[in-house]
Image: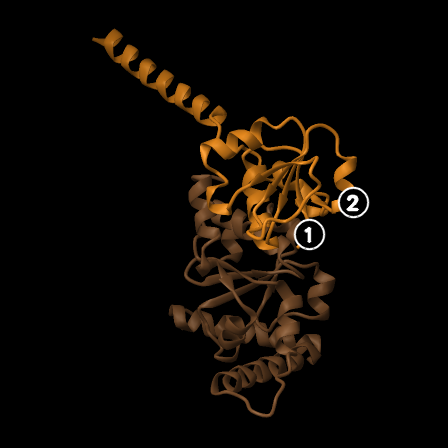
Chain colours: A brown, B orange
Amino acid sequence: MHGNPKKILAQTLSEESFLTPDQLARLIVAEDSTLQLIDLRTAEDFKRQSIPGAINIPYSNFIEADLESYLDETLRSVFYAEDDFKSNYALVLATGFGFENCAVLKGGLKSWNDTLNTEFSGDLITARENALFETRYKARRMFTEFNNMPESLKLKFYASREIERKKLDGGCE
Amino acid sequence: MKKLIHSTVFGAMAIIIALMIIKSVRPGNFRNNTSKWAVQSYENSNLISVDMIDTLKGNTLIVDMNSQKAAFNKNLNVLQVSSDLLLSNENYKKIKSNKGSVILSGDPAETAQIWMVLSQMGIEDLYILADHN
């Protein structure tokens, strides 16, 4: 790692470095192509369940991995794990290695699942709650459908995203 | 003339090498070998529970970043500080000079980040209090 520790910590602790599950759900539903999700759990956990569009770099491989071949600096890299620890370690490491456009999913996959399954109580629902409910519902549906897909279809999904990304970059002529 | 050029080049190299040595030993900079200083985070052996605090040897220092001022055993050495002031010279010196373990207490995301930064700066026997709210 290189750089000024104070500066790195100020950057990684800033609000911009954290995405709540609701913020991420909005981006997932909108199929935001400026986002790059990195799942830091083991390959087995990733295969069982992951957020649509995420790539898997198990944390134990993260430090030794050639991050330049995984992290596209033109995209915002969002790290997540089961909870907050490993994703925040990775955020500091990536920032220390010079990748500035990084963030973490606050609370990890646990918080993601809890938030998406939150029920609203009461007879009346505000406009804001309604918007949240809709986004969470769509994100939950995408998440469930994606994780119920057979492996072959998931691979096609990733391949199609790669082609789309290359088209945006002017590749695949 | 040749002697002058050689002396100049030699002098410049000596200055550069001296600066590199100073940079590597000056407190407040990252150590080399990132993975060595991150190894505890792989297996979660840097996470500690309240019950395990008494098993630690030496002077245990708790760095409490919990703004609600968590209540700890009165016999423990507690440094109450916010995360943005943790790396001030004064606080860093207290952590660096502690003869024993240092435990970070606070929000999991904050403590994880601070643990990684302090570890990479060469602080050993550094733990995160994983079950304290």
Q: Is residue B38 visible?
A: yes
Choose top left, top right, bottom left or bottom right for residue B22.
top left
Choose top left, top right, bottom left or bottom right for residue A138.
bottom right
Query: Circle 2 is placed at which residue position?
Result: B51
Q: Is residue A65 visible?
A: no
Choose top left, top right, bottom left or bottom right for residue B35.
top right
State left or right for residue B15 relative to residue A139.
left
**Three-letter amino acid code at disc 2?**
Asp
Report the quarter where the C terminus of chain A lies: bottom left
Query: Residue at 61% of width from left, 53% of height from top?
Result: B108
Q: How many marks?
A: 2
On screen, residue B100 above or below A98: above
Q: Residues within 10 Å of mark 1 (few under 14, many from 20)?
A: some
Query: Circle 1 is placed at which residue position?
Result: B132
**Three-letter amino acid code at disc 1?**
His
Closest to the observer: A113 or B12? A113
Closest to the observer: B51 or B112? B51
On screen, residue A79 above or below A90: below
Query: Residue at 52% of width from left, 48% of height from top?
Result: A92
Q: Residue furthest bottom?
A: A123
**Label 2 element class:** helix
